[in-house]
Image (cartoon, grey):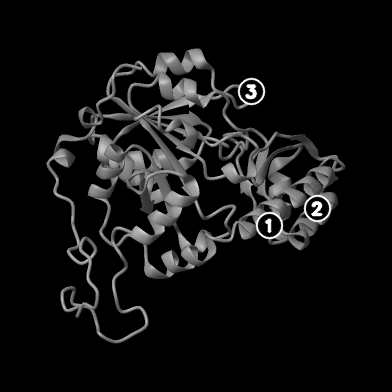
Amino acid sequence: MKEFNVNSLVRKNILELQPYISFRDNNEFENPVLLDANESPFGEFNRYPDSTQKKFKQKLSEIKNISADQIAVGNGSDELIDLIIKVFCEPKKDSVLMMNPSFAMYSFYASVNENKVLKLDLNENFEIVKDQFLNMAKEDQLKIFFLCSPNNPTGNSIEDIEFYVKNFNGIVVVDEAYIEFSEKKSSLELLEHYPNLIVLQTFSKAWGMAGARVGIAYSSKEIIKWINTVKAPYNVNSLSLDLILKSIDSQEQLDNNVKNTLIEKSWLKDEFQRINCIKKIHPSDANFFLIEFENVEAIYKKLLENEILTNKRSPQIQNCIRINIGNREENSRLIHVLKQSETL
């Protein structure tokens, strides 16, 4: 990769944009009278949250061993995906690259921003073909490559991520929403070597806090500065920040969530292997399986009739349904209905 200058990739209007700065959050006070933000003086949550999320970032910094100014906090990873596109992609001009199949929101937010979406088709094992990647990476006006690992909806991890970061002249976003379930190393260890890398993680999956809507971006100080420039000033609410700050010290909670999910995953896989209508269980490093069925439409309909909600990926991924790991009661209901469906 040639010498990297992040400002050469940032949209011109963003380079000239002045971020919203809260005077209160950027200064220290011992016993302030808060009459500056038109808040109510009454109520349990009457004050705006810290727009810079200082305490939260400092805690993450200690846990991840990454400087606090290399961390951006979003209202879920979705907001961060949207912000990254807004920072780097000129509407009606620039393009993004994503794997196919992969997480649909990369394409969604690019389309909202009027950017072209190039799709890198995965092979039959849902792996990237490196030569195809190198050819597509040469496309003009290509700014961002979204790389999801473990990948949603396929479940597999992408091998040799460093190759793609090294051989892409724009921004590489590695989405690690499911990394806690995988034995693969996080791409966070690549940050010090590659200033064009952004790693996304979330509290929605392994932490069990999807309702809190908190996602994290880790990157170079320069990239994080631009993400913080375009984000809304109070983008993450006090309730979510307080909830996660209380939980984040409990590595035991995370470990138990992951352990119990993997126990259920192993149990489910054993049960799936005994069901005749299942043709293939694709390898998964995540908290879900992509499963190929004999009669996918009938199976999906039967599950829905029994109020078991799954994610039908067919016809994009032929004959496949994505099923995430539930608790034992939920998983047992799933298996019961699938066994009833074997004659469909």
- Where residue 124 is drawn, which disc sits there? 3
* Residue appearing at x 27%, y 29% in the figure: 94
Q: Nearer the viewer, mark 1 or mark 3?
A: 1
Please, what is the three-letter code of the amino acid marked with disc 3? Glu
- Work out whether residue 45 can be spotted: yes
- Between 10 and 271, which is closer to the camera in this rendering? 10
Separation (CA) of disc 1 from disc 2: 24 Å
Q: Distance between the residues labelled 1 and 3?
A: 34 Å
**Mark 3 or 2, nearer chain start:** 3
Q: Mark 1 points at which residue?
A: 256
Q: Which residue is painted at 38% across and 53% down in the image? A: 74
Quadrant (top left, top right, bottom left, bottom right) of the N terminus: top left
Amino acid type, label 2: Ile
Q: Residues within 10 Å of mark 3 (few under 14, many from 20)?
A: few
Find residue 298 and report its horizontal and vertical position in percent.
72, 46
x, y percent for residue 7: 21, 31
Horizontal arrangement in the rendering, residue 157 relative to residue 293 (left or right): left
State the CA–CA distance, disc 3 to disc 2.
27 Å
